[in-house]
Amino acid sequence: FEGKIAFLPVDIAPGSDLTGLRAFADAQGYPWPVGRTDLSMLDAFDVTIQSTKIVIDPDGVIIYRAGYGNGTVEEWGRIMGIY
């Protein structure tokens, strides 16, 4: 999906910081930015399970949501109009 969508993994773990998150992302070869927030974001997006994937369209509307272990790359590509 590189160059076609914006991807932002967000961490909520207490005690984590952006420097450590960036170091982890770099070590894993992740090219995208990382973010840090708190539990209020989970409430705002109604996230109830680890590793939730949410797709937000250009109008700010959530058009896809999948929890841990759900969804495939092909499914995400169709939802985002890439495939």
Image (tube, rainbow, N blue to C red):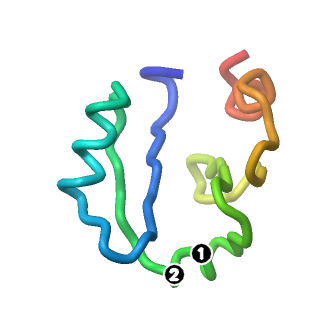
Q: Quadrant of the N terminus?
A: top right
Q: Quadrant of the C terminus?
A: top right
Q: On the image, which quarter does residue 82 sit in?
A: top right
Check disc 2 and report the residue beneath it.
39
Q: Residue at x 45, y 69 (%)?
A: 12
| Residue 44 x %, y % | 61, 79
Callout 2 crowding tier (Cα within 10 Å): few <14, some 14–19, many ≥20? few
| Mark 2 and mark 1 residues within 8 Å of each other at the beta carbon | yes
Furthest residue in direction left, as rendered: 19
Compared with residue 1, is residue 48 higher up or lower down, i.e. above or below? below
Compared with residue 40, is residue 7 higher up or lower down, i.e. above or below? above
Q: Residue at x 31, y 74 (%)?
A: 15
Kindly identify the amino acid type of the residue bearing the numbered disc 2: Leu
| Residue 58 x %, y % | 56, 47
Q: Residue at x 34, y 25 (%)?
A: 29
Q: Residue at x 33, y 28 (%)?
A: 31
Name the side, left or right, on which 72 lies relative to 41: right
Check disc 1 and report the residue beneath it.
42
